[in-house]
Image (cartoon, rainbow, N blue to C red):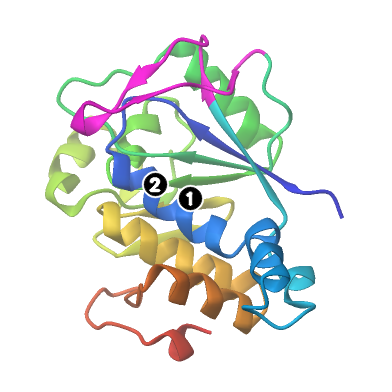
Amino acid sequence: MAPIQFGILMIPYQMLDVAGPVDILSTSSKSLIAQCEAAGLLAPGLSEKAIDIEFHHINTTMDPVLMTSNISLVPTTTVDDCPPLDYLLIGGPDPMTFKLDEKFADFIRKHVAAGKGIFTTCTGGMAISSSGVLDGRKATTNHQALEMAKQMRPQVNWVKEQWVEDGQFWTAGGACAGMDMFSHWVAKHYAPEIAAIGLMGLDFEPRDIEGKRVLRTEQVV
């Protein structure tokens, strides 16, 4: 089976919105688990069950993008040259100042029209709402910005949940809620031991969908 092609839209997002979810995928990946097998840290054969994934960081140009904490990131591709994706992740920018570039909006619409998956974390849901792809959908965003989201795009059914799965769309609340969501996505689609390895590698115990209690790793898987 071909590797998952996973894209990250390089709008000026909060770093943890993307770094947390991507690290969960990375620690559950075939390449990392194979390295641990080779070092004798894990039993042989586990890597065959892991996530085979390739990451693409997508901008409208190849210019660096300034994220939070004054971190500058360099794209790996552009919206014009990006290979077909299976999933696209959008982290959260400042909703007071951000406006979605039309080239990004068109890229998102084509991705959705192709039936591929969308993930948003924090205000990422708000960031892409102007494209119209969330209209009529149930979605969430940073809970501190829910009322703003309802005013900004009333066509979306904004709800206060840790994360929401609605068809091809997965939307999460704040940055750490995005890590919760991705932990459960891995547990839903891959072997229990793969999800456990990924979470233990990060020393992370995700919350349930209501965000009311911390889940132990064995409960996730």
Q: Is 115 above or below relative to 100?
A: below
Residue 53 shown left or right of residue 181 in the figure? right
Q: Nearer the viewer, residue 136 or 43?
A: 43
Point 54% across, 24% down: residue: 58
Q: Estimate the spatial distance between the alpha carbons at disc 1 and disc 2, rounded to whole Å.
A: 5 Å
Q: Please report the bounds of the magenta region as a residue range.
A: 58-80
Return the mark for residue 19: 2
Helix, strand or loop at mark 2: helix
Q: Quadrant of residue 69?
A: top left
Helix, strand or loop at mark 1: helix
Return the mark for residue 22: 1
Q: Is 95 above or below relative to 146?
A: above
Instruction: Pinpoint residue 124: horizontal percent, then vertical percent.
Output: 34, 39
Residue 194 shown left or right of residue 162 in the figure? right
- Residue 172 is covered by the magenta coloring: no
Residue most toward the right? 1
Instruction: Pinpoint residue 140: horizontal percent, then vertical percent.
Output: 32, 52
Residue most toward the bottom? 218
Residue type at the position of mark 1: Val
Residue type at the position of mark 2: Ala
Point 66% across, 70% down: residue: 39
CB contact under 8 Å: marks 1 and 2: yes
Q: Quadrant of residue 214?
A: bottom left
